[in-house]
Amino acid sequence: MLVGITYDLKADYIAMGFSEEDAAEFDSPVTIQAIDDALCALGFRTERVGALPMLAGALLQGRRWDMVFNIAEGLNGFGRESQVPALLDYYGIPYVFSDPMTLGVCLHKGVTKHVVRDKGVPTADFAVVETAEDAAHVRLPFPLFVKPVAEGTGLGIGAASKVRNHEELAAACARLIARHNQPVLVETYLPGRELTVGITGTGKNARAVAALEVVFAQTAESQAYGYVNKQEFEDRMEYRLAHDAVGEHACRVALEAWRALGCRDGGRVDVRLDAQGVPNFIEVNPLAGLNPETSDLPILCYKTGMTYRQLIREIMDSALARNGIGHAMPADPGPGSPLWPAENTPVSGAVCGTVHGAQAATGIAG
């Protein structure tokens, strides 16, 4: 079975003039290599396609794949993560992870909270501020928490995200709107523990892998899991599995949100406890980072004993099953077994890392 891999490489966007922060959501060659290796070890043939322009060019040339492993973040607007899945839908090519509607809804954190709240999932009261002047009309009790409505990787979140009065709220909204050119989500501040829940599967077959508590070290930039803390997580953050009742409750809340939003195959849901100790939905990442060294979802899986390959296997299992596609993946003999393979050992017959066309493995250049 041939699996195409679609992605946006950070280096390509930096070469186009993007700053490190503006390109923070895009992927590194390490991530693409890890996914490619894992797929090959599971018996798939792979072809690296790249970003949307390369995908469109390949499709127009008549190129097709049995499945596409899509981690492309896209470019511009609330629908940017939907661009590649929408194009694949047009051509009738199945792909891994959520459909265009779900990705569009989940990228806009205000719309996301409307959906989960209507489904009865606990989430903090909120408002969406479209202009700096609108901040004066927010009628929520302080303290509040503010962040861009459609950014990932903690962009726009930091020490100034917690605001205590109308003056701080107005200043924060004006700063974020000017910097990110998009509305601001204003929420009731949640003072409790923060956890991220890893999920694999789809619908009733989805499962919570585990809840990982995000613990702020003394050196943390703030008590918010923002861009600086994420970029320098080794010095500023600690992570530990939450095996207690809070962790179990967080997993239930995360699964309810995952199913309410129609998310598929794998990702993360972030929750934080309110003043009464109830886990509240914060946001969902249906296109979670898969860097094998630095992304939260793989880190969470490692702490449970799951390998990177097993994570990719569960994601592919879900995508194949909901598309009614059969593919026998080699069984993992289990850790500790003498038959336990090295993480990136391709199985016999697999062709790994084929690069489509003349793009030289990069996403948008060429």
Image (tube, rainbow, N blue to C red):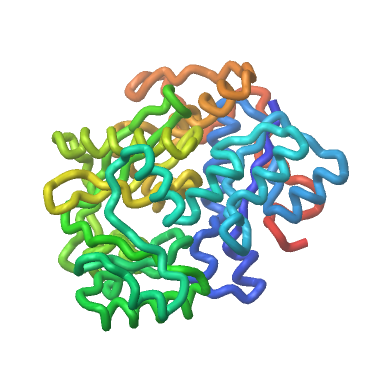
- Say whether residue 360 is left or right of residue 315: right
Tell me where residue 204 appears, x and y as whole percent: 42, 23
Tell me where residue 11 appears, x and y as whole percent: 60, 65
Quadrant containing the C terminus is bottom right
Residue at left offset 67%, top offset 47%? 84
Residue 173, placed above or below residue 255: below
Residue 19, placed above or below residue 190: below
Q: Name the one closer to the observer, 13 or 105.
A: 105
- Say whether residue 67 is left or right of residue 22: right
Residue 301, placed above or below residue 316: below
Residue 67 occupies which quadrant of the picture? top right
Quadrant containing the N terminus is top right
Residue 30, placed above or below residue 130: above
Tell me where residue 214 appears, x and y as whole percent: 24, 52
| Total count of labels | 0
Residue at left offset 74%, top offset 33%? 92
Residue 326 occupies which quadrant of the picture? top right
Tell me where residue 343 appears, x and y as whole percent: 46, 34
Q: Is residue 131 visible?
A: yes
Q: Name the one closer to the observer, 323 or 235.
A: 323
Q: Residue furthest left?
A: 276
Residue at left offset 50%, top offset 46%? 287
Q: Name the one closer to the observer, 206 or 100.
A: 100
Q: Is residue 302 visible?
A: no
